């Protein structure tokens, strides 16, 4: 049986579900794209090919394996993109919450059933109807659960709005020992440069008390002020709009000291090393074309 345990983004990773690009379905039609960056690359004829995606995920696998992480993979479903395992479920404490994801992605939940067989039924939580959350919008920081969300007007307007306000009440009720803090995010179905698909596209804790942040991704200045006060201005690595677009915030922590990052993030990686982190670099530029990166490709089940 899998013993679930995740309280933050940086505890030493023991068990993770890593996405797979095998038989990912190829280039979709524009009308079937559900994020603006994918649409942008379909229109430009630069959408990634399967071989490149498989190679990038294999490189990620090798880094995780180097640190003796137990790696689970979804079983293969033909013509289905199963790279972004973060969104289909997420773990808080010893509970796994199965997401209510958009209709276009419902089939991605099928391989999760095999993994759930290895988890105590009492620790599996299904969301009530009307409560929408994707795992990229849920970030853990010990006593805090940070949630990127959209109020009803934006949620009903934008396809890229994946987590609604009801999710905050659900998480507060389910985890009364946690402080649930919601952040409204900037959304756009058409312009990837002005769209924060999930909270982890514009914010992520690293190390013990540091974080990467794109301040313009938050709709409300009060939320930015809150994070500046909580972490301290000197402990926040601020990124630009272009860097947000390139997914700088979506690195992945194996531990408080070890961060996996894209090798094109030159400025960020230099800062991280200067702050004492071990930075494991790889090429993940093709996955990035689908508006997700390293954190999006992982579903941590156990951290120490």
Image (cartoon, grey):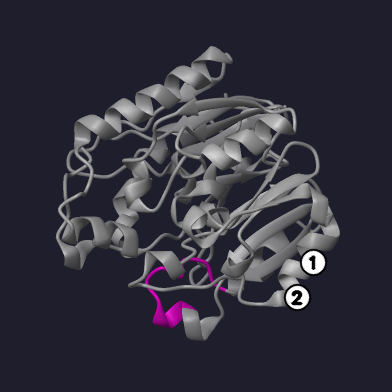
Percent across and percent down for residue 253 are 62, 34
Q: Compared with residue 167, is residue 206 higher up or lower down, i.e. above or below?
A: above
- Magenta-span inclusion, residue 232: no
Q: Quarter of the image holding residue 259? A: top right
Q: Residue at x 53, y 52 (%)?
A: 135
Decide if residue 120 is in sight here.
no
Q: Residue at x 60, y 73 (%)?
A: 166
Percent across and percent down for residue 161 are 46, 70
Which type of secondary structure does the marked residue at label 1 adopt? helix
Instruction: Point out the image quarter for the N terminus.
Output: top right
Indicate left or right for 49 with 176 as reference: left
* Secondary structure mostly taken by the magenta-highlighted segment of the chain: loop
Q: Nearer the viewer, residue 30 or 168?
A: 30
Inter-mark Cα distance, 1 to 2: 6 Å
Furthest toward the bottom, the residue is: 153
- Magenta-span inclusion, residue 160: yes
Span shown in magenta: 155-164
Percent across and percent down for residue 143 are 81, 50
Indicate left or right for 290 with 101 as reference: left
- How many tags in the picture? 2
Which type of secondary structure does the marked residue at label 2 adopt? helix
- The answer to whether the residue labelled 1 contacts the one labelled 2, judged by CB atoms less than 8 Å apart, is yes
Q: Compared with residue 290, is residue 263 higher up or lower down, i.e. above or below?
A: above
Instruction: Point out the image quarter for the C terminus.
Output: top right
Q: Which residue is mark 2?
A: 222
Q: Quarter of the image holding residue 82? A: top left
Q: Which residue is mark 1?
A: 226
For disc 2, the neighbor class at 10 Å (few under 14, some 14 to 19, many from 20) is: few
Q: Nearer the viewer, residue 118 or 296?
A: 296
Percent across and percent down for residue 8 are 71, 41
Q: Residue at x 57, y 13 (%)?
A: 68
């Amino acid at each position: 049986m899998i013993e679930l345990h995740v309280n933050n983004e940086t505890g030493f990773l023991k068990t993770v579900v890593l996405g797979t690009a095998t038989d990912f379905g190829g280039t979709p039609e524009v009308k079937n794209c559900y994020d603006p960056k994918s649409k942008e690359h379909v229109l430009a004829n630069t959408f990634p090919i399967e071989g490149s995606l498989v190679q990038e995920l294999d490189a990620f696998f090798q880094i995780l394996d180097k640190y003796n992480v137990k790696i689970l993979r979804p079983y293969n479903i033909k013509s289905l993109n199963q790279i972004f395992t973060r969104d289909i479920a997420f773990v808080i404490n010893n509970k796994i919450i199965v997401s209510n994801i958009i209709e276009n992605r419902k089939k991605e939940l099928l391989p999760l059933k095999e993994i759930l067989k290895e988890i105590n039924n009492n620790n599996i939580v299904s969301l009530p109807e009307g409560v929408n959350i994707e795992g990229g919008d849920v970030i853990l920081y010990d006593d805090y659960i940070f949630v990127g969300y959209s109020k009803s007007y934006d949620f009903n307007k934008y396809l890229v709005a994946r987590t609604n306000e009801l999710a905050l009440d659900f998480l507060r009720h389910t985890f009364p020992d946690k402080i649930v803090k919601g952040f409204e995010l900037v959304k756009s179905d058409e312009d990837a440069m002005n769209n924060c698909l999930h909270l982890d596209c514009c914010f992520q804790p690293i190390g013990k008390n540091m974080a990467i942040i794109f301040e313009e991704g938050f709709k409300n200045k009060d939320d930015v002020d809150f994070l500046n006060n909580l972490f301290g201005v000197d402990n926040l690595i601020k990124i630009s709009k272009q860097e947000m677009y390139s997914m700088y915030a979506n690195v992945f922590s194996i531990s408080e000291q070890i961060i996996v990052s894209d090798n094109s993030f030159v400025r960020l990686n230099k800062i991280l090393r200067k702050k004492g982190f071990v930075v494991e670099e790889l090429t993940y530029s093709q996955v990035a074309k689908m508006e997700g990166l390293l954190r999006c490709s992982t579903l941590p089940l156990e951290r120490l």
